[in-house]
Amino acid sequence: MDTREIDTRNYTALLKKYIETQDEQALYGAEQISKSFIKKNILPEEFVNLHIQALLEIYPDLHDKIKPSMHFLLEAMISYGLAHQEFQNLREKQLAIKSEILVAARMQKMLLQSKIPETDELDIGVISVPANQMNGDYHHFVKGKDGTISITIADVIGKGIPAALSMSMIKYAMDSFPENIMTTDTVLASINRVVERNVDPSMFITMFYAQYKPDTGKLYYSSAGHEPGFYYSSRLQKFKDIESKGLVLGVNPDASYVQDELNLEKGDIIILLTDGVTECRRDNQFIDRTEVIDVIKKYIHLPSQEAVNHVYRHFERLQNFQLRDDFTLIMIKKQV
């Protein structure tokens, strides 16, 4: 005897028992049959049809008004079954995509990781948190043989996988340059040509690139349309914007950049960030840059890493723990 025929007979018997006795044990039996149907990949409309046939066997003279309603249910379940199957297929594809993105995010984190250089002159703290799984922000440090510290912070105007791929390209382009013998404006001009040739025209990248020279105590820097950072003068106990003109990367292959400089004294601090910091929102309103400075002031006395961690937690709470954009903050404090 066919197993499906056995299931049909069992279901009919259980249904009849439940109708006559309202026995909870019959409901348990129906649950077990349902599980066996799932294993056998029996569709919802087949289950409904089985129920109709069982009712007709139990009550051959089923009221004429009941029969059409059962057939209506069967047709509805056929449509439901098709829609449910499409939903399941879509869900499986989405889970597969999520899994791939998770793997890609882990690879990106590994590829873009940057170790903070050890130096007696500078106390450096960094925090970079993506709004989603993939990070559209990038930061990197390189310590040269002469003690020069190169600092890069960049932001892709865009999100998701394309932004992440662009950052990976930027990282390897930066690694190919002899950074310590190239001026900051030359580095940006070279990166700009790479971006213009290789990145989709709809995407642009902002970047701030700096070099700290321990022999002069100066920070040399250039900007490609990046969010201005802050310079804190310990002697004057004042903050001011770090401004440097330059076109965002990827717009014009012949764009040129300027190199500016700051003379750093003991206790001076450089704050570099992406617009995910300055564009935090409170009740759908962007905060003011002065608020960022006010928060930094609260933690400026702490070691740099502790300070950036506290600042991040402040703005994370401000946004109800839902970042709207990638958040990257770097603090560089001159110690000697």
Image (cartoon, grey):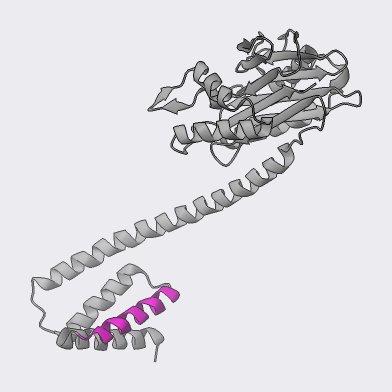
Question: What x and y, as percent, mark residue 108?
Answer: 68, 41
Q: Quadrant of residue 211?
A: top right
118 left or right of 244 in image? right
Asked if one can make out residue 139 in the rendered structure from this viewpoint, the answer is yes
Question: What x and y, as percent, mark residue 233?
Answer: 67, 13
State which region is magenta: 23-40
Counting every numbered tag in the picture gives 0
Residue at the (65%, 9%) spot, across then down = 236
Quadrant housing the C terminus: top right
Residue at the (55%, 19%) spot, across then down = 293
Question: What x and y, as percent, mark residue 214?
Answer: 85, 18
Magenta residues: mostly which secondary structure?
helix
In this view of the protein, which residue sits in the foreground, 148 or 276? Answer: 148
In this view of the protein, which residue sits in the foreground, 145 or 19? Answer: 145
328 left or right of 64 in image? right
**Does the magenta run of residues contain 205?**
no
- Compared to residue 336, the image places residue 43 above or below, namely below
- Compared to residue 120, the image places residue 288 above or below, namely above
315 left or right of 229 in image? left
